[in-house]
Image: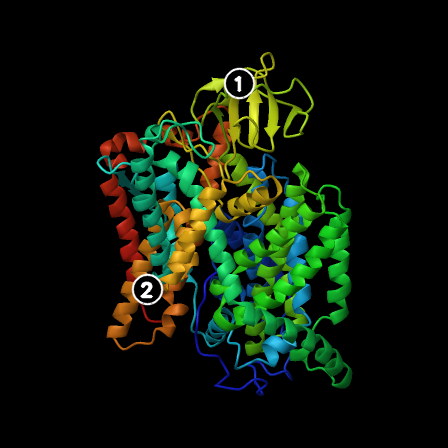
Amino acid sequence: MTSTSAPHPGAGPAASGATHQPFIPATQAPAELTPRAIVLGVILGLIFGASNVYLALKIGLTVSASIPIAVLSITIFRWLGRSTILENNIVQTTGSAADSVSAGVVFTIPAILLMGYDLDISRVAILAIAGGLMGVLMMIPLRRALIVKEHGNLPYPEGTACAEVLIAGERGGIHAKTVFQAFGIAFVYKFLMTALKVWQEYPGRVFRSYQGAEVRVEASPELIGVGYIIGPQIAGYLFAGGCLAYVVLMPAIKLFGSAMTEPMFGTTKLISQMNAGEIRAAFVFYIGAGAVASAGIIALVRSLPTIVSAFRAGFADMRSSRMGQAIAAKLRTDDDLPISLTVFGSIALAVVIALLPQIGVNLLGGILIIVFGFFFTTVSSRICGQVGSSANPISGMTIAALIAISFIFLLLGWNQIDDRVRAISVACVIAVAVANGGNTSQDLKTGFLVGATPRRQQIAILIGAIGSALAVGWTLTFLNKAYSYQVPETRAGFVAPASGASPDGNVVVHTETMSHFGIGGTDSIDNNMYQVIRVYVETQGVPPGKYLVDPASHEIRYVVDPGIGGRIREYRGHELKRLDSPKATLMALITDGILTHKLPWGLVLIGVFLTIAIELMGVSSLPVAVGVYLPITTSAGMFAGGIVRWLVERRVRSESRSLAEIESGPGVLFASGLIAGGAICGIAVAAIAGWGSARGMSAEWLAEKVPIHHLLGAVSTSSLIGLVMFAILGVLLYRIGLRKQ
């Protein structure tokens, strides 16, 4: 999520506990929690939630949707008739829950795929709902301490900026035309590029004279939008990490490893025979994972003073708020849901999760959810108040919780195959609760500034979390299925059991069979019948995953490579679309490393020491480490957006204008529209590809039916043309960013 900073509406440099007069006084009670506000909030939340799922799978980041949802709400209600500022606040409060729910789920649950399991939409939805509700419940007793008493000390940048937008809208100074325009442009742009192949999606080049190096950019509207929002510094760090991986580490591995006569680190191929993509998958992937994990822990350690103070403040507030409620009559703007709901609601959620058989979380898992959930939710809320959601180390807190959970399981002897899924499930609920706790804090800050009723906001977030959870589960499973491919693969010497499972339980033969499927996303069809097996722990060099075996010989013939985190990128010159899900992959590596002892620790430690070296140079290691882990195509696309943002800020400074207006200005709105339009189009293209694949056609069958790229010939495959189209998008974003509000 991204951070914005702006002056506090209705607030000066007040000290903690200073009297605050909201935009709508407590003595007034305009329409607020109306059915139309809830419905519109849920709808917008579903749209932005789906786009954030897509983003989180591609780049491991989500962006705040509060401001664009607020702008859209103001405009839509103007079309329908008059609305109140509190109604619009309920819309953004309900819709923004999608940010946190999607982040927490996508950062953890896809790890199950990498362990050889399928995604179950019911599991995803239940865990997401539980985490979303718990994040809200745990913020009920903390609102007075963090939002009211700390007003003037904790700015909550996103919440404050959103309040400014709502107040501007109430005064008639805001409209959503910019968002709608950007959405349409992004959707058409990406559809022409990805579905019809009119121009190159990944322009760039492989350096033949500099073996192992490769520089490309994903010329997508959502990435340039994300880069603009996160700003030039973070985007630059990400790209620097990508350059370190693709221009330094990979060529170095190729240069020094080409002389080796044996494979290393469990690979089956000599380094001299590997291309750039294979080197990344075999070596740099684990180096990047070690770098990201260590950088996340460092970010968490840096936050320890805040953690300690937040934890103390949380307990103090629970005591003082109970006393305060008993003494004074509540104003409308001070009316919360009862604190008892936090205690009994959290316990009830943990018990339900522990008892549901499809989840597999036992009673200890439920207890760990409550303990870690409350602790890190408190931390998350205070950090968001100090520095904004963008600097909130959600992944670091989740990693810390997962490490602790995994070691607890290990000490108890719970190191079987299914225990890994149990650990990930517990971490998922915690991650969603932590993310939603920070998001709820921002929403409550917005409500505090505009004069909303806390109880009604809390109800709206609860509703939004449930709706978003259902959308996130469906989107996640849908995208994985759409981009899954059956790719020919044989494993010499590996023979699957005829039925049942191997003695160690690492390989299981299922009654499920598969036939009549497209091979590797091409038009070629295999009509033979195959048995489905699953490998849960690497066995005889066979990585975890889903495989198809010959029923007669019991030998592997295909790997069913998942769309999320799949390891095969190309088949017979045909590029296979993949969603890397970097954060979830990291969670899988950590859990596997602790519970199965199968992690290549040598490569991971290289990443750890790389992070330490970056920190010693005085550079923030987390974005650089994420850049090492991500494909350079992704970081380069975001870097382009960061450059545009830098150019806009440079021009604004020269005109003696305030940089604060950029944070919620036309550029940010246009970038938000690019993100939503590009992501929604990506989901639509996935649906088209999945429909064709299910009928035995190529994943790119639409491009064949509408052969525009054939008519254009070399133009459609030219990297230069692809870069030109991307540059045009950047110029448009620059011009919009310079507009005055």
Q: Amino acid at mark 1?
A: Gly
Please, is residue 310 above or below residue 281 in the view? below
Residue on which disc 2 sits? 737
Residue 404, x across and y down, in percent: 63, 54
Q: Residue at x 31, y 54 (%)?
A: 640
Q: Nearer the viewer, residue 507 or 692?
A: 507
Q: Nearer the viewer, residue 480 or 381?
A: 381
- Give the mark nearest the N terminus, 1 or 2: 1
Q: Residues within 10 Å of mark 2 (few under 14, many from 20)?
A: many
Task: Judge left or right: residue 475 versus residue 171.
Answer: right
Picture quarter with the C terminus: bottom left
Q: Which element is circle 2 on?
A: helix
Which tag is nearer the camera, tag 1 or tag 2?
1
- Residue 698, located in which quarter of the rendered image? top left
Q: Which element is circle 1 on?
A: loop
> Tag on residue 493?
1
Q: Residue at x 66, y 37 (%)?
A: 417
